[in-house]
Image (spheres, grey):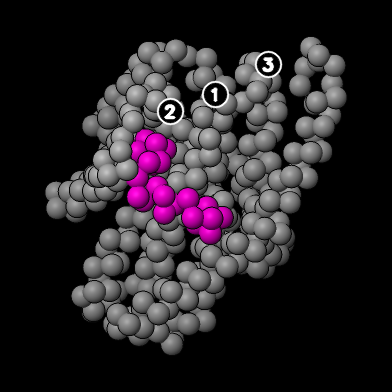
Amino acid sequence: MKLYPLTSLRFFAALAVLFEHFFQLIGASTDGSVQFVSRVSSQGYIWVGFFFVLSGFIISYSFENSRDKSHNKWFPYLYRRFARLYPVHLITLLFFCYHFLGGAQYVNVGGFIVNALMLQSWVPSPTSYWGFNSVSWSISCEMFFYVAFIFLITLSARQLYVLFGVLVVALLAHYILVDQKNPIASWMFYINPAFRLVDFMAGMIVFNLFKRYEKSLEFSFGVATVFEVCSIAVVTLFLYFSFAYQVDPLLKYGIYYVLPMSIIVFVFALGRGFFSGVLTFKPLVYLGEASFCLYMTHLMINGEMYNYFRSKVDVNSFGDVLLYLALVAVVCVVFASILYSFYEKPMNNILRRAVMKKIVKAPVGTPA
C-alpha cells in the first residue's frame, strides 16, 4: 500500500516553512493583508513537527512491511536512511561554504565537521544548530530518531506508550522548572533531539493505532471527507488558540502541536476522503517526493532572491508581496524538482546499490 496522501502533504509542509522564512526577510509592512499573512506564516515552523511525526509513522510502516524484520539487520536500515539524507545535506553544506562563506579559508573547521556529521542539533549554540545551512538542524534530529528506533521498535505497544508519557512529563517538568529567559531554553524545546523524540514517538504510536484500527474503520467517502476536514480544522483551531491565548513559544516549539499533527497523519494515512484523493494526483506526489530538496534549498534561494529583488518590491503593497512570493515559491520548487530528479534520486540509488549488493551477497549469518 502506497501512502500517497502523506507523501503529497510533505510538499505543503515544506511550502509552509518556505513561507515563514520568506516573510522573515520581507520585514515590517503597513499593509494589513501583508501583516495578517505574515503573522500566520510566522508559525510555519510547526510543520517541522509534522515531519517528525510523519517520520515516526513512515519508519514504523516501512519496518512492518519489510520482508526481513530480523533485528540483526540494522546496518542496512541505517545505511538506507543515511543514503536518503546525506547527498542533499552534503551538497547544500558545500555550496553554503563556497558561496556564502567565500571558500574553505573562511569556514570554521570544527563547525563544519559537526554539521557534516549531522550532529549540530546536539550543540546548544546558535553557531552550531543555525550554522551553515540552518534548516539542516532537523536532519540531525532525524538521524538520532533513526538510531533510537532500533531500541524503540523492540518495545511492546504498552511500553512505548509508557515511555512516551514519561518523556512528555519530563518535558513539561523542564518547562516549569527551566528559566525561560535562559539562552538555551529555545534550543532545549525546539532543537534538542532528546525532546523532539516525543514527536517521532507520537508517529510510532499513530502507526500502532493505524495498524490496529485500519481495517475496522470502513468509512464511506463522505464520512472520510468530513474527518479530513475536521483534522485540518483541529490544526487551525490549535493555531488560532496559540494566537488568541498567547501560548508560550516554548510549548509551541514542539509538544503543543504534537496532537493535531498526529491526527493529520492518522486521518490522511487512511486515505479514503476527497482530499486524500486529490493528494494522490501524480504531480503532487512527485512534489512530495522532492520536498526534502525544497526544504534543504529554499532558505538559500530565498536569501539570494531577496538580495536582488528587495529594492524592487514594495512591502507595503499586498499585490507586490504576493507576486514576489509566487515568484520565490516557483523558483524554489522548480530548483528542488531538478535537484531531486538529477541528483538526490540518482545518488540515493547509487549509494544504496554500492553497499546493498555486498550485503545481499554476504553468506547467511554474516554480520551486516
Q: Write down the quadrant of residue 97 in the picture.
A: bottom right
Relative height, residue 164 to residue 262 (above, below)? above
Please name the amino acid that badge 2 sits on.
Answer: Phe
Q: Write down the quadrant of residue 301 in the picture.
A: bottom right
Residue at the spot 36% in from the left edge and 19% down from the top edge: 161
Residue lying furthest front in this view?
A: 220
Residue lying furthest left in this view?
A: 245
Whichever of labels 2 and 3 marks the residue nearer the N terminus, that label is: 3
Q: Name the residue under label 2.
A: 207
**Residue 127: percent from the left, percent from the top?**
52, 52
Q: From this viewpoint, is residue 250 visible?
A: no
Please name the amino acid that badge 3 sits on.
Answer: Asn
Please name the amino acid that badge 1 sits on.
Answer: Glu
Q: Do the residues labelled 1 and 2 touch (CB within 8 Å)?
A: yes
* Residue 318 - label: none
Count of numbered labels shown in the rendering: 3
Q: Mark 1 points at which residue?
A: 64
Q: Mark 3 points at which residue?
A: 72
Residue at the spot 36% in from the left edge and 51% down from the top edge: 275
Relative height, residue 258 to residue 327 (above, below)? above
How many C-alpha atoms fall within 10 Å of the one at disc 1: few (<14), some, or many (≥20)? some
The answer to whether residue 188 is magenta is: no
**Residue 78: percent from the left, percent from the top?**
65, 30
Whichever of labels 1 and 2 marks the residue nearer the N terminus, that label is: 1
Residue at the spot 65% in from the left edge and 29% down from the top edge: 77
Which secondary structure, mark 1? helix
Distance between the Cα atoms at labels 3 and 1?
15 Å
Mark 3, mark 1: which one is toward the viewer?
1
Q: From this viewpoint, is residue 305 visible?
A: yes
Relative height, residue 307 to residue 178 (above, below)? below
Decide whether the magenta segment is chiefly helix, strand or loop: helix
Q: What range of the chain is rendered magenta?
A: 266-288
